[in-house]
Amino acid sequence: MAQNNELDRLSAIAQKFTQQFSSQKQIADVRSFGSGNINDTFLVSLSAIEQEIEAKPFILQRINTQVFREPKLVMQNMRIYGDHVRDRLQKHPLERRWEVPQVLLTEQGLDYWQTENGEFWRSLSFIEGSQSIDAIANTAQAREVGYALGTFHCLVSDLAPARLADTLAGFHITPRYLQQYQEVLAKCEMRRSPELDYCLKFVRDRHELAHILEDAKARGKLALRVMHGDPKVNNILFDQQTNLAVSVIDLDTVKSGLVHYDIGDCLRSGCNLAGEETEQWEDVRFEIEFYQQILEGYFSTARSFLTEHDYAYIYDAVRVITFELGLRFLTDYLAGNTYFHVKYPEHNLLRSLVQFRLVESIEAQELVVKRIIKDMC
Ligand code: ADP
Ligand code: GN1
Ligand code: MG
């Protein structure tokens, strides 16, 4: 539970999202929730004054406006996405539970609340009976993670990417991250260590990786579609009873892009059993059995809109996005940890070691990774 003063402040902000309230309900608790690296997320519990009234909890989030400079555009995209998907689901219901978080409105009918000091808050319906996981534990979960991403892509396959605003310029344009890294590297004062030297050498040796997907896009081999942008494992919710995936959340980066960044991101996060935050970075491996299951789950819903070129770039997608994330963590470490939430100064360095080790493991299994895709085409 938040400290008393903070609790009062958060409760006052939560009260703005009046859709949840009637005089019959009051805030019982506001607590920090989930393990996202960008926004601040809280779970708000309510209590009903009269027993027969249902008091559902909801999510309250402070958008990181250092990252999302135009948060109103983020909300606009969420609205366009939500309306599209809800409409589609109504016309063509899925044969199983699937949830789209609902944005809750303020008293004034707005989908955000801005405080006097400029903080930007929003509120979402809580997907009931669900949970997120930071690492996949078994092959059934792996398949569900793939199914969830495939369902997401399928539901937006008829949404024109141009309808969505660019909420984060340069997001998943890997060559831009390389350029930023080089600029930061040229200016920063480094505290050398064997780990940092490993990372610096890693980027020197692999810098050409950064161009593969963008070159394919420029040559017309890969087309722009609606992407999620951040479909890592803990942005997929599982039903606590059935253990089936029920929602893809964290919709801030839903915009025009390459679905390959999504496929790659889902695989790199799903196939790392140790999770992104492990301290045993040298033991990190890309788990091939989970890879196969995630892809099977993905293709079970997404096959209809994939082209021959799309299949041909899946191996590259997974190593490029893994390299990109390692590069982003490393750049943030060198720049003084201004982008990702960190718990200690070397946190981003450790995270980048984890991703680079994962790239090595993917490359070491290149033949089998490619064969599995070929067998599924
Ligand atoms: P961040 O951008 O910081 O990652 P997220 O939107 O992913 O923020 O939210 C952080 C965590 O909060 C998620 O991983 C999930 O556990 C939980 N969460 C967020 N939205 C919902 C929701 N609508 N229902 C249930 N849990 C949610
Ligand atoms: C961030 O917000 P969160 O924790 O779901 C980041 C992703 C990274 C991820 C790595 C907007 O995601 O791009 O892949 O951390 N989101 C943004 O854990 O930069
Ligand atoms: Mg998240």
Image (cartoon, rainbow, N blue to C red):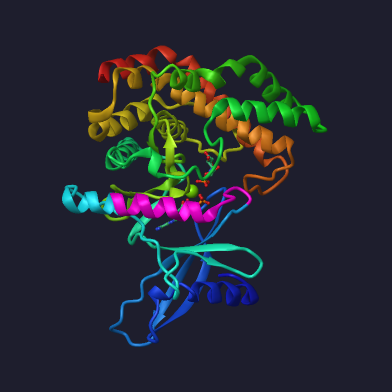
Q: Main SS type for the magenta part? A: helix
Classify 355 as above or below 85.
above
225 relative to 303 in the view: left or right: right
Classify 224 as above or below 27.
above
Confirm whether residue 339 shows in the render. Answer: yes
- Magenta stretch contains residue 75: yes
Residue at image location 42% in from the left, 50% down from the top = 77
Residue that extends furthest to the front in the rendered view of this protein: 162
The percent position of residue 280, horizontal first and vertical second, equals 59, 33
Residue at image location 75% in from the left, 28% down from the top = 185
Residue at image location 70% in from the left, 37% down from the top = 333
- Is 28 or 177 nearer to us in this picture? 177
Classify 52 as above or below 272.
below
46 relative to 117 in the view: left or right: left
Residue span colored magenta = 66-84
Confirm whether residue 137 shows in the render. Answer: no
